[in-house]
Amino acid sequence: MISPQAVTAYAPATVGNVICGFDVLGLALETPGDWVTVRRSGRARGLRITGITGDGGRIPTDPALNSATVAVASLLRGTGRTEGLDIEIEKGLPLSGGMGGSAASAVAAAVAADRLLDTGLAQDEILRHAVVGERAAAGGAHLDNVAPALAGGILLTRPSARRTLVGLPVPPELTIALLHPRAELRTEEARAAMGDTVRLADAVAQWGNTAAFVHALHTADWDLLADALEDRVAEPARCGFIPGFGAVRHAALTAGAAGCGISGAGPSIVAFCRGTDQAAGAGEAMLKAHRAEAGPGATLYRSRVSARGARIVSASGGGP
């Protein structure tokens, strides 16, 4: 088989924390997402970013600072390869939006490079290289974004454990309504607002909510799922950074959503809904509330949880 000269991969948006599972729960959406193309350059070595679209010219083009190129550089080191590669990034995700944008670019780049170079890496190896890219761009290794962007579904992530990822069932009716305000909130800023300690009562409540959420997924118990979707750790410290958050959350719950909270570090706001009709109603209520409290300029996404994470969308100049 002739090796391709260019490979494009897509990686979806993710919802980190899933409200009640700070740093340990994450899920993948079907859309939106990022596309990354990795192309053989003809040079003996070295990475070069040849184009970025959808970012307003704000994402660094220095290969040492961009999550996509850092992930590919890690893959090259890990596999002992030295090819020169050119990388193009098409951003479908907002910057600092709480939707796993840097993770998606890192994952898509690692998946595309693996296919282009025919390195045949296992999923956990690709994950390791993508985490290196995410750390460079976001200031930390946020496995609850990187893992679902790669593997899809709803995942329990355990960074220090032997079994790092645990796939969880997805109730077939589960639909996400996600509102992205025209605002940015850097992960470092949102994390710093939380401090270094959590009250014991809040920690115990959060552990209980996380365990209840996992059980609710396994049993499709929507009453328990709704009861579990409460964040006692991050939301109290972060909600003040998000204009109109309280009104938007109230609107989603009043419209029937099972739960509503901050997506990742914010400022996006996510609602968990039972079916597409409920997601449509909750989403419109969220938009209306945000418009009344904070003005126009928010984007609404509705999506099922994606069973697939990153995937190859094209391979040109060689085999399929």
Image (spheres, helix red, strand yellow):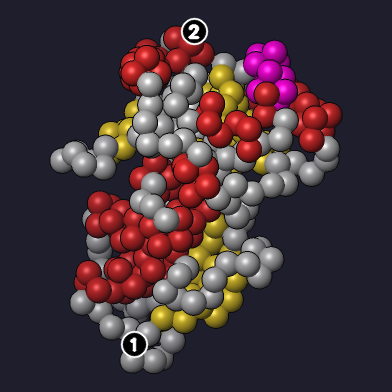
**Residue 312 appearing in the image:** no
The location of residue 249, given as percent across then percent down, is: 66, 23
The location of residue 151, given as percent across then percent down, is: 37, 45
Q: Secondary structure under badge 2? A: helix
Instruction: Please tell me whether residue 63 is drawn above or below residue 24 in the rendered image.
Output: below
Nearest the camera: 273 or 25?
Answer: 25
The label on residue 97 is none
The residue wearing badge 2 is 223
Quadrant holding the C terminus: bottom left
Quadrant holding the N terminus: bottom left
Tell me where the magenta segment starts and ends, as one range: 247-256
Q: Is residue 219 magenta?
A: no
Nearest the camera: 160 or 54?
Answer: 160
The location of residue 155, given as percent across then percent down, is: 36, 35
The location of residue 9, given as percent across then percent down, is: 47, 61
Residue visible at 38% across and 26% down in the picture: 198
Instruction: Please tell me whether residue 260 is drawn above or below residue 47 in the rendered image.
Output: above
Question: What amino acid is at disc 2?
Answer: Asp
The residue wearing badge 1 is 45
Residue visible at 55% across and 80% down in the picture: 50
Residue visible at 51% across and 13% down in the picture: 226
Neighbor class of circle 2 (other Cα within 10 Å; few <14, some 14-19, many 20+) is few
Q: Is residue 49 left or right of residue 248?
A: left
Main secondary structure type of the part rendered in magenta? helix
Q: Secondary structure under badge 1? A: loop
Ranked by sequence position, the earlier of labels 1 and 2 is 1
Q: Is residue 252 magenta?
A: yes
Nearest the camera: 237 or 274?
Answer: 237
Question: What amino acid is at disc 1?
Answer: Arg
Residue visible at 49% across and 77% down in the picture: 62
**Residue 54 appearing in the image:** yes
CA distance separating discs 1 and 2: 56 Å
